[in-house]
Image (cartoon, rainbow, N blue to C red):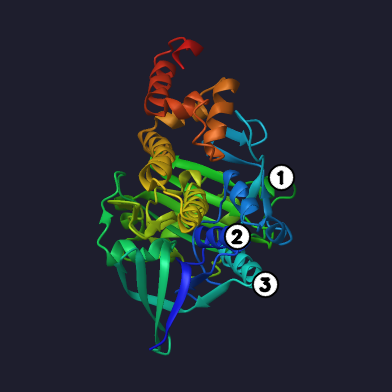
Amino acid sequence: MNIEEVDILIIGAGPSGCVAAGYLQQKDVRLKVIEKSKFPRLVVGESLIPRVMDHFEEAGLIEALQEQNFQKKPGARFIRGEVISIFDFSNKFGDGWDYTWQIPRADFDHAMTQELQRRGVDIAFEQTVTAIEFKGGDSLTTTVDKAGNVAKIRAKFVIDSSGYGRVLPRLLQLDKPSQLNPHSAIFSHVKDINRPKGVEGTQISFDVLDTEVWLWVIPFSNGLTSLGIVAHTDFIEKLKGDSGTEEALKKAILLSDFYVKRFADTNFEFEPIHLKNYSAAVSKMFGEGFALTGNSSEFLDPVFSSGVCFATESGILAAKLAYRQLNGETVDWQVEFADYMQRGIDVFTTYVREWYTGNLQTLFFHRPENQDVKRKICAVLAGYVWNEENPFVKKHDRVIRTMAYMLENNETFSHDML
C-alpha cells in the first residue's frame, strides 16, 4: 500500500481546521485535510463572536466569507422578563472587531472549504480515521472511505480539529469529565415568517426563562432562524417526556413570553437535534507530534458562543507553532499552547459557571446599568479573554461573584475593587 507523505495532517474541516489550513497554505506547507462528513453538513455553532474575525483574516479567508453576505452580528441581547440587556461590540473595553456574523454552519463551513480548495488545499471528504501511530516524531494515520478503501498518511505533525468527533482523544484515551454541570440543548431551524422588520428581526437573543433555562434565537440572512432551548439535562429530559424532541422544543417556545407570538405554530425545517451533556474536556491538549484544537480539546457551553472562538484561536495557534517547529525552532507547547489556551478557557468557564449560579445574570439585569462594567464584560463576550488589562479578565475568578453580592445587598461598588 502506498503511503502519502505530508508535513502536516489536519483532521476535520470545520472552522478550526480551516483556519489552520488557510494559515499553512499561505506558508506553502505540504498539508492535507481529512474530513469524515460530506459538505455541506448540518452542525451547531451558529453564533460567532468578534475575536474569530482576527483568525479568519490571518488565514486569508475573510474576503471569501464577507462575499457570502451572512447576517451581521453587532452585539447580543439578553432578555429576562421585562428587562433587556444589549451588549454592543463597538462599545467594549480595548481594541478588536466590532462585529461578526450569525451563520448557518452548513453554508459557512462549505464556503471556507471551497475557498481553500480553490487555493489548492487538498481536502479529502468522507474519510474516517481508524488508527494513528506516533513514532520517532512522525505519525502514520490510517483512514477508510465510504467505499471501504483504506489509505495511510505519514505526517510530521497532526492537528486534530475533529470537533465532536474527538478523534485523537478517543484513540489515545485523552477524554476526561468536564468541570461544568451537565447541560443539554435541543435546536432546529424555522422559516421566520413573522420576523419583524429592522434590527428587531435580525437581533440575536438569549431569552432567560429561568436561572438555568434559556432560549436562543439566531436569525440568518437567508430568512431562516435557529431556535434552541438550553437547560440542565434533567429539565430537558422532563420537557421531552414521552413525546420526543420536536414537542420538547415547541413546549420551550411556549415558555417564552417574548417570542411565543413570533414562533408559536411554526414548523421546523428538520427534526430538532438533541445535544446531551455536551461539555467536554481532555487530560492534555498536545503530545509529541500532535495538538488538539477546538471541540477536540474543550467545549464549554453555548450561552456565550465561545465554541467557534476557541476552535479558531487554538486552530491558528497550533498551525503557527507547528510551522515554527517544522522549520527547526524549539516550541514550548506547554507554555505557548496549552497554558495560553487554558487562560482563555478558564475565563469563559468562570462566566459560564457564574451565569448558571445567577451571579452574572444579576450583573446583566441590574438597573441602573453600570456602563463601565458593561464595557468590560462586553469585551469578554466579544472573545477578547486574553487581554489582562481588562479586570473582568484578569480577576474573573472573583470579580463577578463579588459584584453580584454587593448589588444584591445594596452595597456601594468602588472601582478600586477591580
Nearer to us in this view, 308 or 62: 62
| In front: label 2 or label 3 | 2
Q: Amino acid at mark 2?
A: Lys
Residue depicted at 36% across the width and 63% down the height: 166
Dot 3: what SS? Answer: helix
Residue 277: x and y in percent read 32, 55
Q: Secondary structure at mark 1?
A: helix
Q: Quadrant of residue 189?
A: bottom right
| Quadrant of residue 157 within the rendered picture | bottom left
Q: Earlier in the sequence, mark 3 or mark 1?
A: 3
Q: Taking 166 as reference, is 385 left or right?
A: right
Identify the residue position indicated by label 2 in the image: 27
Q: Earlier in the sequence, mark 2 or mark 1?
A: 2
Task: Single out the mark in the foreground, 2 or 1.
Answer: 2
**Residue 53 seen in the figure:** yes
Q: Quadrant of residue 129?
A: bottom left
Image depth: mark 3 or mark 1 in front: 3
**Among the two numbered marks 2 and 3 on one chain, the one whose residue lies closer to the N terminus:** 2
SS label for mark 2? loop
Q: Residues within 10 Å of mark 2 (few under 14, many from 20)?
A: few
- Of 356 and 69, the residue lying toward us: 69
Which residue occupies 48% across, 11% down? 416
Amino acid type for the residue under numbered disc 3:
Arg
Question: Which numbered disc covers residue 118?
Answer: 3
* Residue 12 located left or right of residue 63: left
Q: Which residue is mark 1?
A: 199
Where residue 195 sits: x, y (%)? 68, 54
Question: Residue 28 in the image: x percent, y percent?
Answer: 60, 64
- Pointer 3: residues within 10 angstroms few (<14), some, or many (20+)? few
